[in-house]
Amino acid sequence: MNSVNTKVKSAERNPVNKTTEMAQDTTLLNPRFYTTDFDELDKVNVEPIREAWDNIMNELRSDPNKTHFKKTKEWDKFDFDDLEPELRKEFIDFLVSSLTAEFSGCVLYKEMKRRGKNKEICELFGHMSRDEARHAGFINDSLREIGMDVNLGFLTRTKKYTFFKPKFIFYATYLSEKIGYARYITIYRHLEKHPHSRFHPIFKWFEKWCNDEFRHGEAFALLMKTDPKLTSGLNVWWIRFFLVAVFATMVIRDQTRPAFHKALNVDIEWYDREVLRITSEISKQVFPIEIDLESPRWKNGLKRLLKAFEKLDEAKRQRGIQSKIKRVYFGAVAGLTFVSLYLIPVKKNSVPKNSCLQPTY
């Protein structure tokens, strides 16, 4: 216990501990912080979807998970040092990546509420910021137990922000929320059947937790429903881009954590297929297209993209002119492979008039 307290005090003195540096790092695969055009966001008119909007807002106001993110007797005693070194490393990476993604939503939504003038939109983002803050805080409490919590205040001030137009925020965040739901619920259902593989108590909280993710995705689906142009015409090409980018990023990230998935007794290939299947099925509620996940070109393209990122990562750890040449080369290979994935013919989808869904997986 004394060693844990010493680590916590050390983290307080030094705001840039290892996990804060990990969260602060901005790469193609790491979760980013975003900002947007708040004046344009204020122009959103929810009247075309008033009934559905009122329903989701009433659900958010009721705050179903108000008391969920608290440690109870279900939080088993856990000794982090009992984990194998590689599993420790990958589990920390999983926690920090998840925390950064949750906190990114919290920061963006809070800023939308603070700077916006549209009362309907401000209230929505106020509720979602509340939820994401709880998620990030709960993960950070898990890291704090081992003296490795992220300095969120420092992260807010120093993390690089990426500007996205509101419609890009809608596409990217909708998919992030829905894929977050699919990831959490797939892990939770798997561990229901294999409780011996639950090596950390945080997984017990995933079921209700992922319902927040699902609910937030529903709100973004409705925002896209306010204007038919957002999901038609040239914007369909942007939707296609974000589908490929979000799906491919998830697969590549997962492949970097073999020890983590092995400890969960999860086959990474099966897990990724299941998560993408669920997310793709859900996204039919609002997107007029879907990726052909069964296409050999999709599967082979992902393998090539993964290989390119592995080689790119190796090159980054090297030095000298040879390293620079490799980085340029494999960066180009990754870019061209992404383009090939983007150009795979997509499936057309007939979007239902009533797009409201409930979490059923």
Image (spheres, rainbow, N blue to C red):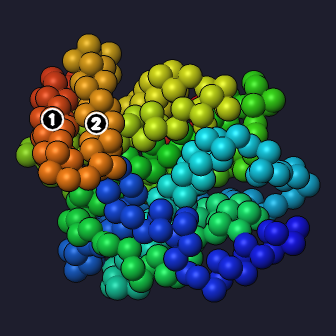
Q: What residue would you read off at disc 2? A: 311
Work out which quarter of the rendered image holds the C terminus and state it: top right
The residue to which callout 1 is attached is 333
Nearer to the camera, 180 or 257: 257
List x then y, in percent, for residue 304. 25, 26
Residue at the image point whose x is 61% and y is 37% from the top: 260
Apparent side of residue 71 relative to residue 208 in the rendered image (left or right): right
Which residue is at 68% across, 32% downward?
263
Callout 2 environment at 10 Å: few (<14), some (14 to 19), or many (20+)? some
Q: Residue at x 32, y 57 (%)?
A: 27
Q: Could you say which quadrant of the image residue 8 lies in?
A: bottom right
Foreground residue among 215 and 58: 215
Element class at badge 2? helix
Quarter of the image with the N terminus is bottom right
Q: Tag 1's secondary structure?
A: helix
Judge the density around disc 1: few (<14), some (14-19), many (≥20) Cα neighbours within 10 Å.
Answer: some
From the viewer's perspective, tell me whether residue 96 is left or right of residue 246. Answer: right
Report the amino acid beneath label 1: Val
Q: Is residue 100 visible?
A: yes
How far across and how far down the image is residue 253, in percent? Answer: 42, 41
Q: Position of residue 33 (x, y in %)?
A: 36, 67
